[in-house]
Every structure is written in structure tokens, then in C-alpha cells.
Amino acid sequence: MKPRTVPWAEIEAASRAEAQRLSMLRLQLVDQHPFWGHVLLRLKLVMAPDLEALAATDCTSTIWVNPLHTQSLDLAQLGFVLAHELGHSVFESLPRARGRNAYLWNCATDYAINRLVAGFRRPGSHGERLYRPPDGAHPTLGQLKVLLDPRFDGLVAEAIYERLVSELTALVDTIEVHLPSGGVPGVVPHGGLDVHLPLDLGEAEREVLRERLADAVQAWRDEERRGDVPEGLERVVDSWKSPRVPWRRVLHRYLGETLIPDEYSLARPNRRWLDEDVLVPGIVPREQRDVIVAVDTSGSMDHDDLAAVGAELRALASIEPNVTLLVGDAALHQVVPASDLPKFLKALHLRGGGGTDHRPVFQWIEQNRRTPDLFVGLTDLHSRFPDQAPRYPVLWVTPGAHGRAPWGRVVEVGE
């Protein structure tokens, strides 16, 4: 289909409209399928009007959506596309490829993910499906056919891949088949809804994904196990649990991987792939990150705990310079901006000593219209918390004996 030149005003209007619809779908997933909604809260949704597909994902931090393509979908179809991209993150599609033929592996993962997404039900509706595959004629992309086949029901992507290989092998005696080699770099078209970006995942990125899934499973449990969770995932996540993790390593990982110091943008393509005639987002530097740290100075934090807090604050400030410090117990007593933090840490006079309540801290963040890249709470967790988790990453740093966090990642000081 011949591309047309789209006026910038039309792109802006479509982007605004699709951002609003995606926000509605995000809220829907959080409410009806908390596991999937929680995963989505940790991913950025970026408009990409140059993308030659409905959507794309790097499986770790970002989902790109082309608003000029998705605007013709109804809400149930757009929800299918969004949940499909989430599936690639949940099931670690890229690192599981392990040298398999890229075309067939992309097809296999799509078959496995689409089967689950098509099975999402609307709670209390006697089995009504929540989303609908965007099959059929599309005004900008031509004919769309979602990779969805009942003969693959109950199979994981690896088993689907082996069946596809077997079926292909049975055909080669009678017809000539040309498939892209898995060794060729770049995006491999596979007839699906999206683009699978050829970005390698290291162990640090995979650890971030595991932590994200563990948090999402906990959110699902906290919501009385409402909605869908992939079969067997709860058992797998429980097997990952480790009671003691060096917190500075976790913080470095949050700042270095989860918070992604750079953005990907199709406006600045990756030159490595241009020679292959493949459009892959390039890296565009982000603005300075926003980190908020809350220190618990309640009576349950003894002298040794507060001394440890001081040491951790100094270490944190050396890692990330743009830190706003909030100090309080049952009320918020001090707000220290990043510019005053070195002087404050030198004196380290922490006001408090009463009960513990973290609700004023999160109220201050909301009232000041802050959406930090990371919230770090230095506390023993014997506190009260908002009913709902915020829409930004939360890291609780605690002494050895501590209470239970309602949400967020918990690590212990001094390990």
C-alpha cells in the first residue's frame, strides 16, 4: 500500500486520541486483570507514527504504537494489540529464541500469546471475551490476519515452534520454501500485528523482568486473585524468591535498567540496522531523572536504624544526584530539595519520633504533581500505606526486622 504524507496536525490529533484510549485500557487491565495491569504500569507507551506496524516492543521497557494505524481499531481490538505486546514482556520472547529461526520463532510466540489474550474474559459477564483480534481489511496496512489457531491450544512457544518446523519439513519435498535465516540481523517480518525489535537482553535486564513479574503476581494476590495469570507462572515466581538481596545492587539496577537512562525513538533510527534496510529505534538521551526518597523517623526506627539510614542516604546521593528527600513519621516534617541535600546530609538532623504513616508522603507527591522515576522508602515498614500502589517504581530499603510492604520491591540494609 503506497504511503501518504500525513500533516503534522493529523499526527498530533491521532496521538492525543490514542493516548487517551490506551490510558482507558490501562485502567481497565489494572481493575479487571491486576497481573497484566501491573506489568503494563512498568512499561512506557510511546507514539511512533513512522512505525510500519500497529505496534512494537523491546520486551523490557517500552511499547511503541502507531496512532495512524491503531486509530481505525475499535477499543476491543486496540486492547488485543496492547495485551499482545505485554505478552512478549511476560514471556521473555526475545531471550527464549536461543538461535531458532527468527521467522518461525516470531510466529510461534505470537501463536502462544494470542491464544492467551483471546481468552481474557470480562469479570461478571458469564464468559464474555474482553478483547477481539483486529482481523480483516485495514485502511493503512491492508489485510490483517492475527496468528491464532486452535490446534496450538495448550502449547508453549517452544512446542509450537517444533510443530511449525515439522510441518515445514513435510512440505519441502514438494514446494520450494524461502524463509529469512535466524542469523540475519534485523527485524524479520512474520505476518503478525507487531514488530519484534532485535535488542539483546543481558542478565541484568532479565533480572528486571523477573522482579517485575514477581511484583505483578503479588499485586494479583493482593487483589484476591482477580483476573488471569499465565498458567504455572505463580509457581515459577515463587521459586525465584530470595530473602536477602544487596540493596545497592538493586538500586543500581533500577537506575541503570528499570529507569532506562535513554529513550528509544524512531525519529533517530539505529544506524547499525539501516544498512539492512531495517528501521529500528535509535537512542535519544533523556532529561535528568527524578528520584524521591522518604525517610521514616518514627519511634519504631531505633538509633542504629537511623544511623544506617544516614549511611545509605550518602551512598544513594553519590549514585543519583537529583534526589528529593522527604522526612517524616506519621506526618511529613521536612522536604529537602536536591540542591540542599549535601548540606543536609552533613548535619543529618532527622525530625520525628512519633508513629508511622506513609500516606502523607504519597499525598505530597501527588499534590506537587510529581511522577518520579523511582521512589525509595527507607523504613522498617511498620507503617500505614495508601490503598493503591502508585504508578511509578517503589523500592523499600529496610533493616533486618521489618513489616510487610503492600506493594513494591523490598530489600534489606547491610547485606
Image (cartoon, grey):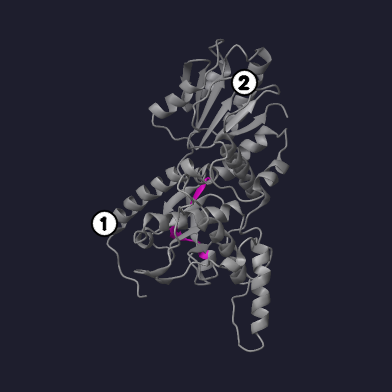
Q: Which one is nearer the viewer's eye here, 26 or 130?
A: 130
Residue at left offset 26%, top offset 56%? 9
Q: For this view, does 123 lie left or right of residue 247?
A: left
| Viewport quadrant of the N terminus | bottom left
Tell me how far mark 2 sits from mark 1, CA to CA: 51 Å
Where residue 174 appears, as percent x and y from the top left, is 63, 89
- The residue labelled by disc 1 is 9
Instruction: Check contact, mark 2 vs mark 1: CB within 8 A.
Output: no
Decide whether residue 415 is among the magenta residues.
no
> What residue is disc 2 on?
310
Residue at 60% from the left image edge and 19% from the top image edge? 382
Three-letter code for the amino acid on which mark 2 is drawn? Gly
If you read the primary sequence from the N terminus, does the residue marked by circle 2 or circle 1 appear first? 1
Q: Nearer the viewer, residue 213 or 274?
A: 213
Q: Of residues 124 and 24, which is closer to you in this image?
A: 124
| Magenta-drawn segment | 261-271
Q: Secondary structure at mark 2?
A: helix
Nearer-the-camera pick, 214 or 186:
214
Neighbor class of circle 2 (other Cα within 10 Å; few <14, some 14-19, many 20+) is some
